[in-house]
Image (cartoon, rainbow, N blue to C red):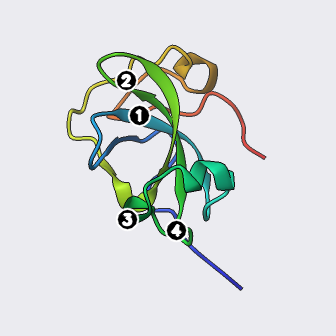
Amino acid sequence: MFKTAAKYHLGQILRHKKHPFRGVVFDVDAMFSNTEAWYDAIPEDSRPRRDQPFYHLLAENDQSYYVAYVSEQNLVPDDMAGPVDHPDLPDLFGDFENGRYPLQFQLN
């Protein structure tokens, strides 16, 4: 049986290693769980391994807010230590405190 452990947690702020965006983790897949079309759209020499956690982020860059799906190998903890301004944050999380966002709801 395949077993993996996510390095990062819900409410944590991360940034992408190569692309200029940061975001808050709101869900984690133990391994790749997106569409084949999404995966195939990534240039072959840049495709992440499928057998690692993938994170759903409420992401932001200088131009916009969006949801990102990113492999663990491409993320690092954000060192800006400031809040993220994504407009959907209040739907899932409480106010920014101690460098992270606390969950606003009960998980199953």
**Disc assigned to residue 35:** none
Q: Amino acid at mark 4?
A: Gln
Numbered badge on residue 23: 1
Q: Tell us which disc is closer to us: 4 or 3.
A: 3
**Disc 2 marks which residue?**
84
Is disc 2 surrounded by few (<14), some (14 to 19) or many (20+) residues within 10 Å? many
Q: Amino acid at mark 1?
A: Gly
Q: Which residue is mark 4?
A: 52
- Earlier-in-chain disc, 1 versus 2: 1
Amino acid on which the number 2 mark rests in the picture: Val
Residue 60 placement: quadrant: top left
Q: Secondary structure at mark 4?
A: loop
Can you tell which quarter of the image residue 83 is in?
Answer: top left
Picture layout, residue 107 above or below residue 66: below
Q: Are marks 1 and 2 in contact (CB under 8 Å)?
A: yes
Q: Which mark is residue 45?
A: 3
Number of marks drawn: 4
Pinpoint residue 39: horizontal percent, then vertical percent: 57, 55
